[in-house]
Image (tube, rainbow, N blue to C red):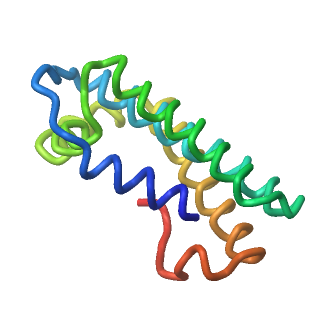
Amino acid sequence: MKFLIAVLFAWVTAPVMAACNLSIEQYVSIEIESRQHTVDGMAQRLILLQQQANVDLMYEADSEIAQKVNAAFARYDCSPAEHARFGVVHEGDITVYLLSHPEKQAKLEQIKTRFNQYTQSIRAIQPETVPAEENAS
């Protein structure tokens, strides 16, 4: 789960870019895409763990996923930190948007469910990598 921690760390601590002008729709699109890449990376990590792949192969796979996540933010000229701040500032508007776009809310819920499933599966194979109290928000 070191990959997830690294992605979250990069997401929170990335330098702030000056030109992040998101709409609520763009915010949600980035949220879905970045979370989907993260979950896809978890699926890949689970397969590699089940195959007892070497650490270098796992780090290579993690790096590819991190590049995809970073590319999602870059397409909108927005850093992960700015995206997170936008989410906090516009939480109410995002909630209203998701209520009027149930397909996007459903997609986020599906991703959250998969995140939790992969977390449990990875924890079963490598319990020291994911503390029991962690889960998707």
Vertical comparison of 130 with 111: above or below: below
Residue at 63% from the left image edge and 65% from the top image edge: 119
Residue at 51% from the left image edge and 57% from the top image edge: 4
Disc count in the image?
A: 0
- Name which quarter of the figure residue 101 lies in: top left
Residue at 29% from the left image edge and 39% from the top image edge: 80
Residue 54 percent across, percent down from the top left: 79, 59
Residue found at the far front of this picture: 56
Q: As drawn, is 63 to the left or to the right of 120?
A: left
User: Could you tell me which quadrant the N terminus lies in?
Assistant: bottom right
Is residue 124 at least partly visible in the picture? yes
Residue 33 percent across, percent down from the top left: 49, 31
Q: As drawn, is 119 to the left or to the right of 82?
A: right
- Name which quarter of the figure residue 85 lies in: top left
Is residue 92 at least partly visible in the picture? no
Q: As drawn, is 28 to the left or to the right of 59?
A: left
Q: As drawn, is 32 to the left or to the right of 19?
A: right
Vertical comparison of 67 with 45: above or below: above
Vertical comparison of 103 with 89: above or below: above
Residue 56 percent across, percent down from the top left: 70, 53
Residue situated in front as seen by the camera: 92 or 82: 82
Residue situated in front as seen by the camera: 117 or 56: 56
Vertical comparison of 72 with 127: above or below: above
Residue 100 percent across, percent down from the top left: 35, 29
User: Could you tell me which quadrant the C terminus lies in?
Assistant: bottom left
Residue at 74% from the left image edge and 68% from the top image edge: 121
